[in-house]
Structure formats: C-alpha cells, structure tokens
C-alpha cells in the first residue's frame, strides 16, 4: 500500500530488515515441535514433517520466504502430521502463522486468502480425524493470534507516523530558530549600518573644516563596518525570508540578564543571578546570543523543574564570555535521549558566534553552559 508507513518492511527483499520479534519466530516454531512431541509422542516421519515446517519459518525470517509458499508449506505439514490421530498441538503452527501473515505480510488479496486457508485448516483436520478434535477452539485461537498480528502491525504504523511527525516538528523548529537568528542578526547589522551612516555623514560635512575630526569619524565607521561584515558573513546561510519586517526595539544584550532573571522570578521560578566582569561591554552579537540562550534555559527550567533552585552566572574575562544556567537538583525531562528542540536552537545560536554549548546532567542537577571567545577588533 502506497500510504502504509511500514510498506518498506512488508515488501519482499533478499535481506529483510532486522527485527528482533521476527528473529524469534523460528524459535517459537521449534518450541511448538518440542511441545507437540513431548505431549503426544508421534512417529519419526511426523517429527520430520514438523521440523520441516519450523524450517520454513526460519527461511522466512532469514531470507523473506514468500508468504504463499510459507502458508502452503505450513498448512500442508499440519494437515499431514495429523493423518494419524496424534500431534494435535501441531495446530499451534497455524496460530503462529496467523501472527506472521497479519503482522508482516502486505494487506492484500493474498494475505486474505492465507487467513481464510488457516481458518479452514481445523475443519480439514476434523474431516480426516473425526470426533475428538477441538476444531472450534482452534479456529478461535487462530483468529485471536491473527488479531494480535494485526494489532502489532497497526502499532508499528502509528509509531512510524509519530516518528515522522516528530522529525517534521524538529525540522520546522530548526527552520523557525534559523529565521529568528537571521532576524536578530539582520537587526544587529542594521544598527551597525545606521551608525556608519551617521559617522560618514558627519565626516562629509566637516571634512574641509576639521580634517582630524573627520578622520576620527571615518575610523569609527570603519570599525563598525568591519564588525557588521563579520556578522553578515557568519549568517550568509541563514538569509531571512522575504516579507519579514525588522524589529525597531533595541536588541537584548548580556547587560539585560538581570531583568530577564527578575521576570522569571516574578513568574514563580526560584532563580538568582551572579555577574562577574563588564557584562555591559560584551560584543553585541555575543550578548544577543547569550541572552537568547539564557532565555531558553530559563524557559526550560520553568517547564521541567519549576521548584528547583536555579542559578544564572555570567562571567566576562579578557578572552571569553561564559554563561551558565544551573538548575540544582533537577533531572532531565527526557533522560532516554529523545530530541530536545530547545537545545538544538541554543546550539545553533552558539555556533553562529563560534561558541561551545553543553547541556545535560551535572553533579548539581541540570546545567546549560556556553563559552564564547571574545573577538579582538582590528
């Protein structure tokens, strides 16, 4: 079926996809042979036929034996071994076949005919054995195992759809985060260009009257221009979509972390803030990035560990700026390693300015730490 998410697993292939449940089917078949022989000992030829049926399951599991061959071989084996009124437990082979066909085979006419043939098998056995064979119980058992197989198939289909939806959500979140980054940096470059225009205009007006002041204004414009070009080069791959307008409000920076922490505290988060160094003098691009990372980290803390004490630290040294958000005693919301869309966005922001970001369990709880080297202006 074209719209079946598990169609790839259903289609015939020389080497089927590794499936631990599929690999156990031959083991179950062999266990049925042993059970039948122990409970109702039969002649050697019946045992050989049963082992042949188990071998068919092994061939299907290893080499994807076509379902019609598997179904025909197993059903014939079950009917043949009960020519002599022994080995009634051999009908368990048909129940196992019901799971295999409805779980792994494509849902088509062949599969439907296979299920009908399985349900008819107890009646065929009854016709050759006479009374004493619980054909109605076996029909119910075959229907039950076929329903189990169909349920497992549906569960995998839903799981595949959920994985695909999760991946699409991750991609959409990443695209939105890139747009946010592009918008922020676009505005940062816009501020830089505005400053350049002011300095150039001033220099043009006083160039003949005061050459020294004009030279100073042009030097400032040159410095701002170089910084803006650096930011533009870093984000050339994240061009913003047409039609998105700029932001007129001042861009956040590292000096506004205190206000960010106060807002989180007002919302009920137990958070404190410590700053070391001249946070207000940090490069605007770095300050914007770390502000956004702190904002995301505090949002995660409010969502996943609202009662855990949270400490935000910002340290500015001569060669680096370090931001650390530590939720004391908190545990990861998804310790199984599932995707964290917020963490992906924070890492993308850190990469833009050449920083390194780590996020995960720490000796004190859950810590987000970002270190960004300070650039030396030429």
Image (cartoon, rainbow, N blue to C red):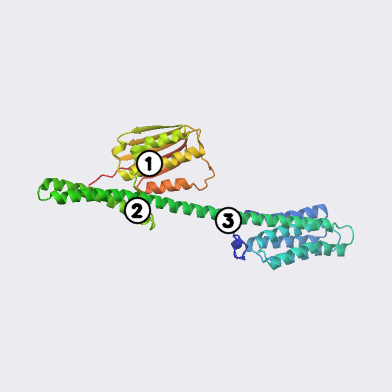
Q: Earlier in the sequence, mark 3 or mark 1?
A: 3
Residues packed near mark 3 inside 10 Å, few (<14), some (14 to 19) or many (20 plus)? some
Q: Which numbered circle lies on residue 375?
A: none
Q: Position of residue 84 (x, y in %)?
A: 86, 62
Relative to residue 100, is residue 289 depicted above or below?
A: above
- Asked whether, in this view, residue 88 is left or right of residue 18, the answer is right
Does the rendering let one see residue 29?
no
Residue tagged 1: 291
Q: Earlier in the sequence, mark 2 or mark 3?
A: 3
Residue tagged 2: 235
Residues packed near mark 2 inside 10 Å, few (<14), some (14 to 19) or many (20 plus)? some
**Farthest residue in the right direction?**
131
Which quarter of the figure has residue 67?
bottom right
- Asked whether, in this view, residue 106 is left or right of residue 208, the answer is right
Does the rendering let one see residue 8?
yes
The front one of 346 and 43 is 346
Contact (Cβ within 8 Å) of mark 1 with mark 2: no
Q: State the residue at coordinates (41%, 34%).
A: 262
**Separation of disc 1 and disc 2 at Cα?**
18 Å
Label 2's element?
loop
Q: Position of residue 285 (x, y in %)?
A: 32, 45
**Separation of disc 3 and disc 1 at Cα?**
36 Å
Residue tagged 3: 161
Label 3's element?
helix
Q: Position of residue 270 (x, y in %)?
A: 46, 32
Task: Give the position of the N terminus as an image quadrant.
Answer: bottom right
Q: Position of residue 169 (x, y in %)?
A: 50, 52
């Amino acid at each position: 079926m074209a719209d079946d998410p598990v169609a790839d697993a259903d289609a015939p292939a020389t080497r089927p996809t590794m499936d631990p449940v599929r690999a156990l089917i031959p083991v179950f078949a062999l266990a049925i042979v042993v059970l039948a022989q122990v409970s109702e000992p039969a002649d050697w030829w019946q045992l050989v036929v049963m082992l042949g049926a188990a071998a068919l399951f092994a061939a299907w599991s290893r080499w994807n034996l076509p379902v019609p061959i598997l179904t025909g071989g197993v059903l014939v084996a079950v009917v043949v071994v009960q020519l002599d009124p022994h080995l009634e437990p051999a009908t368990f082979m048909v129940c196992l076949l019901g799971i295999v066909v409805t779980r792994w085979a494509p849902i088509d006419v062949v599969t439907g005919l296979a299920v009908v043939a399985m349900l008819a098998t107890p009646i065929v056995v009854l016709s050759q054995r006479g009374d004493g064979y619980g054909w109605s119980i076996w029909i119910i058992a075959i229907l039950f195992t076929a329903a189990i197989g169909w349920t497992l198939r549906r569960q995998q289909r839903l799981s595949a759809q959920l994985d695909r939806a999760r991946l699409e959500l991750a991609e959409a979140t990443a695209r939105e985060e890139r747009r946010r980054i592009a918008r922020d940096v676009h505005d940062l470059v816009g501020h830089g260009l505005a400053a350049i225009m002011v300095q150039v205009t001033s220099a043009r007006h006083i160039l003949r009257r005061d050459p020294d002041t004009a030279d100073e204004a042009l030097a400032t414009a040159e410095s701002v221009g170089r910084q803006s070009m650096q930011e533009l080069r870093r984000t050339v791959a994240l061009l913003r979509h047409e039609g998105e307008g700029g932001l007129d409000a001042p861009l956040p920076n590292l000096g506004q972390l205190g206000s960010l922490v106060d807002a989180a505290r007002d919302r009920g988060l137990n958070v404190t803030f410590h700053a070391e160094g001249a946070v207000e003098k940090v490069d605007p691009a770095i300050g914007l990035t770390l502000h956004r990372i702190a904002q995301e980290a505090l949002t995660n803390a409010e969502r996943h560990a609202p009662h855990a004490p949270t400490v935000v630290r910002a340290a500015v040294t001569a060669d680096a700026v370090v931001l650390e958000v530590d939720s004391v005693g908190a545990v990861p919301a998804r310790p199984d390693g599932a995707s964290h869309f917020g963490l992906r966005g924070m890492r993308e922001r850190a990469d833009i300015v050449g920083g390194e970001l780590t996020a995960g369990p720490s000796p004190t709880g859950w810590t987000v730490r970002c270190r960004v080297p300070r650039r030396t202006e030429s």
